[in-house]
Amino acid sequence: MTDLQIEKEFKASARAHANIAVAKYWGKRNSDLNLPLFDSVAFNVEGLYTETTAVWDDDDFRDELIINDWQVPSHVMGRVQRILDSIRKDVGWSKRCVLRSRNNFARSAGLASSASGCAAAALAAASAAGLELSESQLSMLARLGSGSAARSIPAGWTRWYAGSDPDGSDAFAQTIAPPDHWPLHVFVVQISATQKAVSSSEAMMRCEKSPFWQAYLHEASQAADYAQTAILQRDFSALTYAMHHNMMLLHALCMTCDPPVCYVEPKSLELVKRILRACQAVQACCTMDAGANVVVLCEGASYPFVKNDIIALGVPFIQTKIGTGAQRI
Ligand code: 2P0
């Protein structure tokens, strides 16, 4: 076999979108396997994606990950390494993998770059290794890198099932509604492009010590069912309640852990307050994940009003729609 044939054989590229949670994942029943305590519901964001090319070559475990021309130091590759180790085990070889990855948005700023990154890496690396995995198997593979990446494999509106198996074989995400089920406008408002000071994994651990943790668990464990019903019925008022309640619970919890974690910046709060006011008159709602950026959803009739409100804030934003699932490119 020539060098060219080898490269063709073990090389593949994939694209995956970031996803934003309506009912959020926060808390793990197993941190090695990224198994959540309860189900979560999210939507993919068409305008935020990672493209990754995977190449398997020599027998050598020193994998490489290059993100936007930055060679990731081996000691922080841990998350992606779990995906590659799992593929090596399945294929039964000891080749190394080189992953070249490109995000079209800021990394680690609360816009789920680890979700799109790990989902694209899982699909590209599994395809390059010749593994033919089902969507659920890919979702579980992506989950090993970053929990929320499980939701960036299926398309549109997704639900990640917490499952109950200790080995995580039932903890994968599935589409609950396709991207065109509800043609909402999505605004991603970039309040900050800098990396968050506290990782989600670290913040989740700290939150378990909050005096409000038990109350949070009670509320959050019901959130996925409520959000799914709102989405399936295209009930904007119910979606608004679900998103705002769940966002406030998460950020209030973060602020009460020790040491406290505050992802909210003044401009985030300004926009959230604008949307809280606006949603009494128009069909608009918003959420924040673990970072300062705010994602706003609205229906067509409310679009001009919401867009003007966001422009008035004077920060960069993108307009997009509910996104597709991970795909080979
Ligand atoms: C979510 N977040 O549901 C929640 C809401 C952030 C806030 O999932 O430790 O990077 O890799 O499993 O997936 C971010 O957490 O955490 C996240 P790990 P991940 O989207």
Image: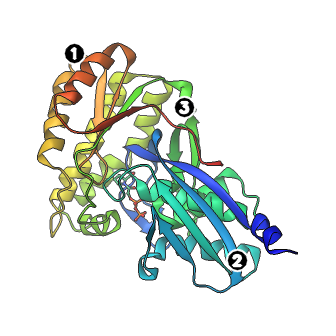
Give the mark nearer the N terminus: 1 vs 3. Answer: 3
Three-letter amino acid code at disc 3?
Answer: Pro
Tell me if mark 1 has few (under 14), some (14-19) or many (20+) residues whose alpha carbon lies within 10 angstroms of its own. Answer: few
**Residue drawn at point x = 36 percent, y = 58 percent:** 107
Residue bearing mark 2:
57
Say which residue appears at 32% left-offset and 19% top-offset: 303
**Front disc: 1 or 3:** 3
- Horizontal placement of 211 versus 9: left or right? left
Callout 3 secondary element:
helix
The image position of residue 285, as x and y in percent, is 29, 30
Which amino acid type is shown beneath numbered disc 1? Ala
Residue tagged 3 = 179
Quote the CA–CA distance across marks 3 and 2.
37 Å
Q: Nearer the viewer, residue 54 or 272?
A: 54
Secondary structure found at label 2: strand
Which amino acid lies under the numbered mark 2 shown in the image of this protein? Asp
Residue 29 in the image: x percent, y percent?
44, 66
Q: Name the element at disc 1.
A: loop
Quadrant where ligand 1 appears: bottom left
* Dot placed on the residue nearer the N-terminal end, 3 or 2: 2
For residue 74, side relative to residue 281 (left or right) = right
Q: Residue furthest bottom?
A: 60
The answer to whether marks 1 and 3 mark residues whose Cβ atoms lie closer than 8 Å is: no
Badge 3 density bin: few <14, some 14–19, many ≥20, Cα 10 Å = many
Tag 1 residue: 281
Which corner quadrant of the image does residue 62 belong to? bottom right
The quadrant in which residue 214 appears is bottom left
- Disc ID at residue 325: none
Q: Is residue 33 visible?
A: no
| In the depicted structure, whether residue 227 falls above or below residue 163 | above
CA distance separating discs 1 and 3: 26 Å
